[in-house]
Image (cartoon, rainbow, N blue to C red):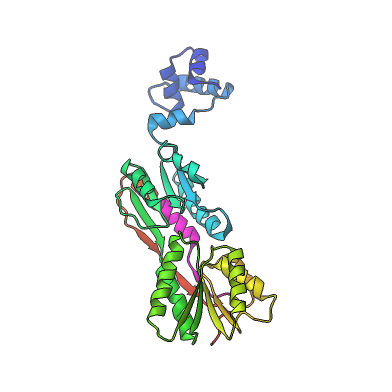
Amino acid sequence: MVSIKDIAKKAGVSISTVSYALNGSSKVTDETSARILAIAEELHYVPNAAARTLKKRESRIIGVFLTDFRGDVYGDLLDGVKEVLNREGYDMIVCSGIQSHRMLPERMIDGAIILDSGFGSEEILRYADRGHRIVVLDRELSHDNINQVLLDNRAGAAAAMNYLLERGHRKLYVVTGPEDSYDSNQRLAAVKQIASERADVTLIEIHSNFEKKGGMAAARRIIEEYDGPAAVFCLNDEMAVGICNVLNETELNVGEHIHLIGFDNIELTKYLQPRLVTVDYSRPKWGAAAAEHLLKILVGEPVKHERMQVKLIEGGSVGQA
C-alpha cells in the first residue's frame, strides 16, 4: 500500500509537507500542493482511515446496532438515519451481534444508535461513562452521554384497546413480542392496565416473537379455543399477517369472527382484505430524529429526550362484537 512517505520521496519534499497538501493546508503553496496531489493520484494513494481516526479522534462513521435486519420497520428506520447522516457528512455502519459491540470501545465509530436487545443496559452505561455518545431507541437510561428517542408505545396500545372496547369486545387476546423487547413490554403494560380497570373484560396473553410464524402459532391456538367472536391485538403487524394467513385457510373470517388489530402499519398490511386496523408512526422520522439527536450530543449541544407520536389507522378488520 502506498504511504505518504512514498509520495514525499517521489516529490522530493518532507512527509509533513505531503500531509499538509493532502489535508488542504494553506502552509503549502498552490503549486507544491498541486504537484503532490498529482503524484498521490498517480501512485493511487488511499488515505489510511485508521491512522486518520487516531489523529483526529473521529471516524465520521456512526454505528447503528439492530437486533434484526428483517422487515419494513428496520429498512424505513435506516433510511431516515442515513438521510440525516449523509447530509451532515457522516456515513453509517449497521451492526448486529455481540462481536460488533467492540466498535465502541475501539473507537471505530464516533457514536451509536442502539435498537438491539443484545446490548445490556449496564454495558451501555459503561460505554457512556467512558465518554461514548449514544442514542437508545429501546430503553430508558439516564446519563449525560445517552439520549432517548422512543416510540409512544403506551399511547398506541391504549388507542388500540379503547378502539376494541368501544366496539363492544370483551374477550381480548393480546399476542406479545419477545420477553426482552422494550416496545412489546411497554405495549403489553398499557393493555394490562386498561384491562384491569374493566371487570367485564377477559384478557388472554399469547407470548410470541414479533415474527409471522409466531402469529401463525397464535392463530392455531385461537382457532382451538374459538367459542364466539373475539378480538385479537397483535403487538406488531408481522404477527397479524401470520394470523391472517392461517385464518384464510379456515371458515373463520377476519372482521366477522376474529377482529384483528396490529401495530406498525407496515406496507404489507395495506393489501390485506379487509384492511388491517393498526397503530401507525413514521419510521423514517424515528430514524432521522435519532441521527439528529446523536449529532447534537457529539458536539456537546443540549438535546432533550423525544417520544415519537403514534396514531391509530382504522381499517376494515374490526367490527362490532
Residue 18 picture quarter? top left
Tell me the quarter of the image containing the N terminus: top right
Residue 153 appears anywhere in the view: no
Residue 166 horizontal side relative to residue 303, left or right:
right
Residue at 49% over, 87% down = 168
In front: 30, or 185? 185
In front: 14, or 98? 98
Q: Position of residue 187 (x, y in %)?
A: 44, 68
Q: Position of residue 238 (x, y in %)?
A: 57, 65
Magenta span includes 279: yes
Q: Position of residue 306 (x, y in %)?
A: 36, 60
Q: Is residue 58 above or below residue 173?
A: above
Q: Is residue 241 above or below residue 102?
A: below
Residue at 40% over, 72% down = 190
Magenta residues, start to end: 276-292
Residue 14 picture quarter? top left
Give the number of marks: 0
Magenta span includes 291: yes
